[in-house]
């Protein structure tokens, strides 16, 4: 393998990894606050992409306006989802909420099949995202450069919100203890709605980026990325935002490299993610960046 | 709160029902009572719902159009009985059993998708009441192999693989090729194997396939496979598989600066390939059954005119093949001069030089059509006819 080809593989891996990272942040944030694995995250991601698609093709809006509308509507959808599927179960055992999340995921998928139809749709791409650049023998599409930048910005903003704002302080408090936060005068419900809204914004951004890179929309498009990003979040240490980014990069690079070095194994690249999950759960269940929590009795 | 969660459960239940009922196919009426001997029943099983519904709909169009043009044979009315196989192999087997035993059809047409046809073929072979079946576009050799009652009006994958290998060697001038194969698809794996056999024979080089990689149905990133092809020394890429993934392969190849010709099979002829791959689809080459601009027989003209009048669009190749399956069935019944399925079977097996819309049909000893293939490319965002390849005699 020549050096420039290796570089090309590296670039491919980083661009796929940053996409996984972007989605994994949303997963991990909701888990960090609520201790709830939002299985419908992948479907919110799908919905965001479809909204952007219809805004561009049916309403003929310019791409940037479509993206903003898609992000706003997806955010509202995330809040509604939380209100209808999760809030009624706030005081139920955690397993009920998880089943509700799975139910919501199936509901959204099947509604999407009915409403959008099963045939794939082509996501329109503005020329600014599809320019092909050639840097020292390494080919790269402009969207692949934009995605890591957006991931970095999202990471920075999220870090700022969680660690340096009042809402963030409330979020951290809620993640420790619902009851105590409520006693301290924090409006727990609105903090949770805010968390879901932010998670859905991240899902919508991730979905739009995904659409720009892989311009093919199907109602089940959120399924596999959703699972993989959940794995990325677990690998990085679920609940830890920086860990999710690292997990995303490990997954993306790993998938590309396994195909690059062993074409015969290329049919098993999805298995890589799951094998990684099993290894992490065996060796370090709290994930790479996760802290071991001491259960207080 | 509890009300809201109850409501959600309710909505979920309703939605599951709604999904189940979408495009429900009207159950055909089995008994027509008194006029029993006055009609000849032909059963059609197709994926009318589920993942392959689009393909099934195209074939249904073809059979219906042919039925409208030729509603009678031997002075009796032909009744079509459609059964939905729901894009499922077990449902396909059930559909065949039902058509044979309950509806008592004289002949079966179907199905889009080799896997469904193979599953139904087992039932047709086992059934006590022997009924012949004609496949329209199922290209896998196993559909008719070892089954005396299954025939088809299309060519089979070994021929298609052969045609594309010849194209790669003679027209592209490639001496080395790379494969990207959809591993979870029997059709793609088979096609790659037949391509490989022919190509090795043509080049006389046992290492003519310099790179071979796989992907799973539903994969979206192929950059790793394509990057490796860049340095493999291949002069063409053969990428048999489903059209959705193939479109992304074309797009990513262009983004990686790969300018090698990309070759594929008949599945690529869908508008989505051009929509999703955009510019990147320009110049890809694939084999298929039929082209509206290469008028193969007089029946082609008749089919095109009728189709244009009824649907006002360009017909797909599989629609022409389904049309052929129906008119061949009628021709066989006429030649047999009987509605007895065994007599019809013998008449079908004897088919020679039958002029269909998608070319002249001559059935070989396996019941496969020996006919020419059409090679197409994408030019200026449209599927464009390149050439016709005749079968080796």
Image: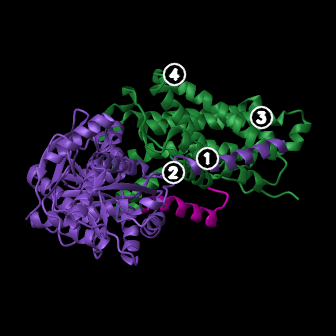
Chain letter for the residue marked with disc 4 in the picture: A
User: Which mark identifies residue B26?
Assistant: 2
- Vertical side of B25 occupied by B197: above or below: below
- Quick check: B319 left or right of B51? left
Contact between marks 1 and 3 (CB within 8 A): the answer is no
Q: Nearer the viewer, mark 4 or mark 2?
A: 2
Chain letter for the residue marked with disc 3 in the picture: A
For residue A265, say whether it is visible: no
Circle 3 is placed at which residue position? A191
- Quick check: B155 left or right of B94? left
| Label 1 residue SS | helix
| Label 1 – label 3 distance at C-alpha | 35 Å
Chain letter for the residue marked with disc 1 in the picture: B
Where residue A278 appears, as percent x and y from the top left, is 58, 65
Q: Rate crowding at label 1 as few (under 14), some (14 to 19) or many (20 or more) other CA atoms within 10 Å.
A: some
Circle 1 is placed at which residue position? B18
Contact between marks 1 and 4 (CB within 8 A): the answer is no
| Label 2 – label 1 distance at C-alpha | 16 Å
Chain identifier matching the green colour in the rendered picture: A
First in sequence: mark 2 vs mark 1: 1
Q: Nearer the viewer, mark 4 or mark 3?
A: 4
Where residue A157 appears, as percent x and y from the top left, is 62, 31
| Label 2 – label 3 distance at C-alpha | 51 Å
First to last magenta residue range: A268-288
| Label 3 residue SS | helix
User: Which mark identifies residue A65?
Assistant: 4
The lab-note entry on whether marks 2 and 1 share a chain reads yes
Where residue B278 appears, as percent x and y from the top left, is 31, 35
Where residue A228 appears, as percent x and y from the top left, is 54, 52
């Amino acid at each position: 393998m020549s050096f420039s080809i290796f570089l090309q593989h590296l670039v491919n891996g980083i661009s796929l990894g940053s996409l996984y990272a972007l989605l994994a942040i949303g997963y991990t944030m909701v888990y960090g606050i609520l201790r709830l694995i939002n299985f419908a995250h992948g479907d919110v991601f799908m919905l965001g992409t479809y909204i952007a698609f219809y805004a561009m093709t049916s309403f003929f809006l310019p791409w940037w306006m479509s993206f903003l509308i898609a992000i706003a509507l997806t955010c509202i959808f995330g809040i509604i989802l939380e209100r209808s599927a999760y809030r009624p179960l706030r005081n139920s055992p955690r397993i009920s909420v998880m089943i509700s999340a799975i139910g919501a995921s199936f509901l959204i998928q099947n509604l999407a099949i009915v409403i959008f139809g099963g045939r794939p749709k082509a996501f329109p791409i503005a020329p600014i995202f599809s320019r092909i650049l050639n840097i020292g023998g390494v080919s790269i599409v402009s969207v692949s450069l934009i995605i890591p930048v957006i991931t970095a910005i999202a990471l920075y903003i999220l870090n700022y919100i969680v660690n340096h704002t009042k809402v963030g302080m409330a979020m951290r408090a809620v993640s420790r203890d619902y009851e105590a936060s409520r006693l301290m005068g924090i409006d727990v419900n609105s903090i949770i709605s805010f968390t879901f809204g932010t998670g859905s914004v991240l899902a919508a951004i991730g979905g739009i980026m995904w659409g720009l890179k892989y311009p093919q929309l199907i109602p089940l498009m959120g399924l596999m990325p959703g699972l993989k990003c959940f794995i990325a979040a677990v690998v990085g240490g679920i609940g830890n935002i920086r860990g999710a980014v690292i997990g995303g990069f490990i997954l993306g690079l790993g998938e590309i490299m396994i195909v690059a070095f062993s074409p015969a194994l290329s049919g098993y690249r999805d298995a890589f993610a799951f094998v990684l999950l099993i290894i992490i759960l065996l060796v370090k269940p709290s994930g790479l960046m996760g802290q071991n929590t001491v259960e207080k009795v | 709160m509890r009300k809201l969660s109850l409501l959600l459960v309710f909505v979920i239940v309703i939605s599951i029902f709604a999904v189940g009922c979408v495009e429900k196919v009207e159950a055909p009426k089995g008994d027509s009572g008194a006029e029993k001997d006055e009609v000849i029943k032909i059963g059609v099983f197709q994926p009318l719902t589920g993942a392959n519904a689009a393909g099934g709909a195209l074939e249904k169009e073809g059979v219906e159009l042919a039925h409208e043009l030729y509603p009678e044979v031997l002075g009796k009315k032909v009744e079509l009985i459609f059964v939905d196989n729901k894009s499922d192999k077990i449902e396909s087997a059930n559909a065949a059993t039902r058509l044979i035993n309950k509806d008592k059809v004289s002949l079966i047409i179907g199905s889009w998708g080799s896997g469904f046809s193979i599953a139904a073929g087992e039932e047709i072979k086992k059934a006590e009441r022997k009924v012949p079946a004609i496949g329209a576009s199922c290209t896998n050799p196993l559909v008719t192999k070892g089954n005396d009652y299954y025939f088809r009006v299309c060519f089979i994958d070994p021929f298609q693989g052969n045609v594309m290998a010849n194209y790669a060697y003679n027209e592209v001038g490639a001496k080395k090729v790379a494969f990207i194969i959809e591993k979870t698809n029997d059709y793609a794996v088979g096609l790659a194997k037949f391509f490989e056999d022919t190509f090795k024979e043509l080049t006389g080089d046992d290492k003519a396939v310099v790179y071979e990689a796989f992907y799973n149905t539903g994969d979206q990133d192929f950059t790793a496979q394509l990057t490796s092809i860049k340095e493999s020394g291949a002069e063409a890429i053969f990428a048999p598989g489903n059209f959705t993934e193939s479109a992304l392969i074309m797009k990513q190849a262009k983004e990686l600066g790969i300018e090698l010709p990309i070759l594929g099979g008949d599945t690529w002829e869908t508008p989505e390939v051009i929509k999703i791959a955009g510019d990147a689809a320009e110049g890809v080459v694939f084999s298929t059954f039929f082209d509206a601009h290469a008028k193969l027989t007089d029946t082609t003209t008749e089919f095109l005119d009728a189709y244009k009048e009824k649907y006002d669009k360009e017909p797909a190749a599989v629609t022409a093949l389904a049309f052929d399956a129906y008119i061949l069935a009628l021709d066989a019944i006429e030649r047999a001069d009987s509605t007895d399925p065994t007599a019809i079977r013998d008449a079908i097996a004897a088919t020679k030089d039958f002029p269909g819309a998608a070319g002249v049909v001559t059935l070989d000893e396996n019941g496969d059509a020996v006919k020419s293939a059409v090679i197409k490319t994408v030019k200026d965002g449209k599927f464009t006819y390149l050439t016709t390849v005749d079968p080796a005699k």
